[in-house]
Image (cartoon, helix red, strand yellow):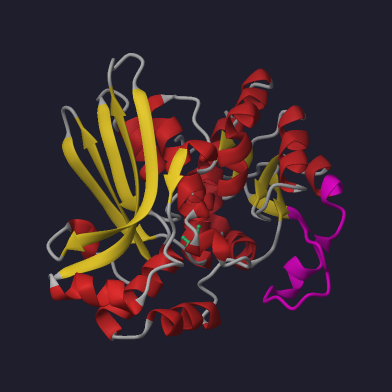
Amino acid sequence: MSAPAATGQTPLRVGLLGCGTVGAAVAQALSTRPALYAERVGSPIEVCGIAVRNVDAPRELHAGLSGLLTTDASSVVHGADLVVEVMGGIEPAQSLVRLALEQGKPVVTANKQLIAASGQELVEVARQQATSLDYEAAVAAAVPVLRVVRESLAGDRISSITGIVNGSTNFVLDMVARHGLGFAEAVERAGQLGYLEADPTEDLDGLDAAAKIVILARTAWMVDVGLADVHREGIAHLTDDDFEAAASCGQVIKLVASAWASGDPAHPHVEMAVRPVALGADDPLAQVREGRNGVVIEAESAGLVSLFGPGAGGPETASAVLGDLVNAACRLRQ
Ligand code: HSE
């Protein structure tokens, strides 16, 4: 990343698609740390529009940002130099990301379901238009696992990736294991605290974790895999008896996502799974608490590389979005 001088430059205009927990955190950071971004990018970064479904929905934004809210998402894309998509879901996110890329504009997204479903196709559009699509925030939020897999371990041979990549279910399982809540009560508590997705089955049935392991597997092995290839079992069917049985053996149940390669290293066969696993108390993943994430990557030369940290939350996910944004803005300036 270059850090050219920041004086007297035309601002880079960022169009924000979505203003939920993550979008609001991105907007707040951009408006409260202008000098930091101007210094790192070499031009000021300004938010030029924020597309939302309902302009009047309650949200915590200061007046300068509230004035940028609009329901006309296409106009936000048209008016921007770079686009940040944090609306989630497949449509209209997919069409808007495609529109931006077709206009040659870099896109940063935190949308795991979109990237798992159409990431390869959208990356190809970006490539054809000589622009970029970045999505570090889509997997494990503030934990920079995609960058490590793609860049730091680019010269190594990864054999497996195993992790806790869904913070909500980890919160539920941790409440049961360490705080003694019944399973149903822990799910209810997670919902009350806003930990669960709008559709809780995304978390509880392992769909969210499946999307993330698909993205990790594609990044590690450049294979054409999708959600349908994941052997998936969620935690919704677990009972208090299951947790008691695990505890009596000194184990904790975690929702573990894993991907592993076998066969010819040049054309590996990749398998993926998401399932509840009873881990020994000394397993590094057994130590992952509350809504945090942890990922262990095994590579031929590096051995075991472990990454742990916040895997969800507004400012935490915004941290990863902003990292991608600063890098994309630097490339744009160059
Ligand atoms: N529901 C997701 C999780 C949010 O709990 O990990 C972050 O992707």
- Residue at x-position 50% and y-position 50%: 137
- Residue at x-position 58% and y-position 29%: 120
Vertical relation: 326 (above or below) 164: above
- Residue at x-position 71% and y-position 40%: 97
- With 142 as the anchor, is 56 left or right in this view? right
Image position, residue 8 (x, y; %): 65, 44
- With 125 as the anchor, is 200 left or right in this view? left
Image position, residue 309 (x, y; %): 33, 60
Vertical relation: 208 (above or below) 194: above
Residue 33 falls within the magenta-colored stretch: no
- With 173 as the anchor, is 139 left or right in this view? right
In the image, 49 versus 212, the foreground residue is: 212
Looking at the rendered image, the quarter that the C terminus falls into is top right
Q: Say whether residue 227 is visible.
A: yes
- Residue at x-position 75% and y-position 74%: 63
In the image, 93 versus 52, the foreground residue is: 93
Looking at the rendered image, the quarter that the N terminus falls into is top left
In the image, 165 versus 172, the foreground residue is: 172
Find the magenta span and give its range. 48-75
Q: Quadrant of residue 148?
A: top left
- With 330 as the anchor, is 299 left or right in this view? left
